[in-house]
Image: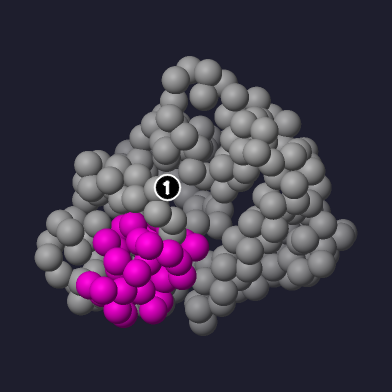
Amino acid sequence: DGIPYYLVDFLDIKENFDASKFCSMSDALIAAQPRRQFIFAGGTGLYLQAYFAGMDNLPPADAKIRAELARQAEEYGKEYLHKRLAAVDAQSAARIPAGNIQRVMRALEIFLITGAPASRLRTGANGAQIPPSKAHFFYLNWDKEILNRRITRRTEEIFEPMLAEARAALAAGCPQEIPGLKSLGYREAIACLNGTMTKASALERIIILTRQYAKRQRTWFARYKDMIRIDLDESFDPQQTARDILGRL
């Protein structure tokens, strides 16, 4: 509708992306348009935290180490990697659930690169408050039951396109381990395509995973004391919500 947007649909599915890249690209965009007011939208709390509150100076990803850890996770399971992490970094292992394989792998990767536990290298920036002087922070809060219904409806709408996208990626020779196919829901889509999971089971599993992700988002954003919360219900009107936000600036 004539409103420019950035960092959406710009990344090849084979590429890794992280908070550091997000911060540097965001800085470049804002520096190029100093008079424009930017809106950061979305639910990736870590990226917002890194941009507005800073981030730890940790080593960049190592493709070879990451590939080997992914191979071990595939061969031995997520619990195996979590036990490896616990042996070298008990604090990180206690904080990161075994099911969050990306964070487990990252903590192990940091240890393998630096020889020091990730928990020792982290400064606490990830838990700092975002200063009100840096940004106005609005949180759109859905009633839980309404949100669950919206998640179910959305998953049903995107499921067939997700299958088609995964099918096309695999047909193009992309391995299942590439970053894009590790996004939420694609493991189930591939299992459906491989015949190891029915469509109904895959759909149900993606709905559950999305609800769990939404719960983690709620937990993450609850940390911000100066956040302005806007409660939403079935009468949600995007334009009116935008006017409400502008009226509070």
- Quarter of the image with the C terminus is bottom right
Query: Callout 1: few (<14), some (14-19), or many (20+) C-alpha neighbours within 10 Å?
Result: few
| Quarter of the image where the N terminus is located | top right
Q: Left or right? Give the position of 58 relative to 226.
A: left
Choose top left, top right, bottom left or bottom right for residue 126.
Answer: bottom left
Q: Is 196 left or right of 50, judged from the image as shown?
A: right
On screen, residue 212 versus residue 125, left or right, reads: right
Q: Residue at horizontal 33%, vertical 57%?
A: 105
Q: Residue furthest right?
A: 235
Indicate whether 152 appears above or below 129: above
The span shown in magenta is 79-108
The extreme top residue here reads 172
Residue lying at 41% horizontally and 36% vertically, measured from the top left = 178
Query: Which residue does the image show at 60% across and 61% down from the upper left?
Result: 213
* Residue 218 image position (x, y, % from top left): 60, 70
The secondary structure making up most of the magenta span is helix
> Which percent across, then down, holds residue 245?
65, 62
Give the number of callouts. 1
Q: Secondary structure at mark 1?
A: helix
Q: Amino acid at mark 1?
A: Glu
Instruction: Return the x and y of residue 246 as percentages of the image width and height.
Output: 63, 60
Does residue 91 belong to the magenta stretch? yes
Q: Nearer the viewer, residue 76 or 238?
A: 76
Q: Position of residue 45 (x, y in %)?
A: 48, 62
Question: Is 131 rendered above or below residue 162?
Answer: below
Front residue of this view, candidates 171 and 233: 171
Foreground residue among 218 and 87: 87
Q: Which residue is mark 1?
A: 74
